[in-house]
Image (cartoon, rainbow, N blue to C red):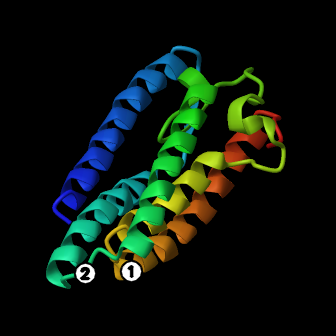
Amino acid sequence: MPWYPVLILLVGLERLAELVVARRNARWSMERGAIVRGQGHYPFMVALHTGLLAGCLAEVWVADRPFIPALGWPMLALVVAAQGLRWWCVTALGPRWNTQVIVVPGLPLVRSGPYRFGWLRHPNYIAVAVEGVALPLVHSAWTTALIFTVLNAALMRERIRCENQALAMLGEVP
C-alpha cells in the first residue's frame, strides 16, 4: 500500500516528538536533583526503535510483502491503540516521563492514568511491545516483527530491572 511509508513516517515523527518532550522533562528533572540510571542500554534502545522503522520499510520493499487486509487493518488498529496508551502514560507522568531512566528524589510514585492499576506496572512498555509487533504486521513484515520482539524482550528485561533499582534506591517500591 502506498500509504504504508506515510504511516512509518508518522510514527517516526511521533518518536521525534517524544524526544523533544523527553529533553524538556530531563531539564525539569535535573533542576530537581534527578538521578539518571541505565545510560548503557539507552543507545541500544534508540538503535532498536530506529531499526524497527527502517526494518518495516526495508522488509516490505525487499521481500515484497503484501498488504493483507484481514491482518493489516486489525494491526493498524493496534498501532493506534498503542499510541494512545503511550501518550496516556506520557500525560499521566507529566514532566517525570522520559525516554531515559531518570528519577527525582522525594517524589512519590505516580498513581494516576494507567499507573493507577497496581497490576500494570509498566504500561508504556506494553505499548512498545504491541507497536513492535503490530506496526510491521500492518504490511506483513513478519521478520521485522519477530526480530524486534526478541530484541525488545531482552532490552525490556534490562530496562525494567534498571527502573526498579532506581526506584528502590529512593525507597519506592513499584
Specify the amino acid type for callout 1: Trp
> Does the residue at mark 1 contact the one at mark 2 (Cβ under 8 Å)?
yes
Task: Please indicate, yes or no, whether residue 34 appears anywhere in the rendered image.
Answer: no
Quarter residue 126 falls in:
bottom right
Residue 65's disc is: 2
Residue at the location (46% across, 49% down)? 80
Secondary structure under badge 1? helix
Q: Is residue 18 above or below residue 60?
A: above
Q: Residues within 10 Å of mark 1 (few under 14, many from 20)?
A: some
Residue at the location (24% across, 64% down)? 54
The answer to whether 114 appears left or right of 127 in the picture is right
Secondary structure under badge 2? loop
Dot 1 corresponds to which residue? Answer: 142
Residue at the location (57% across, 43% down)? 85
Image spot of residue 111 (x, y percent): 78, 30
Q: Residues within 10 Å of mark 2 (few under 14, many from 20)?
A: some
Which of 44/117 is in front? 117
Image spot of residue 168 (x, y percent): 78, 42
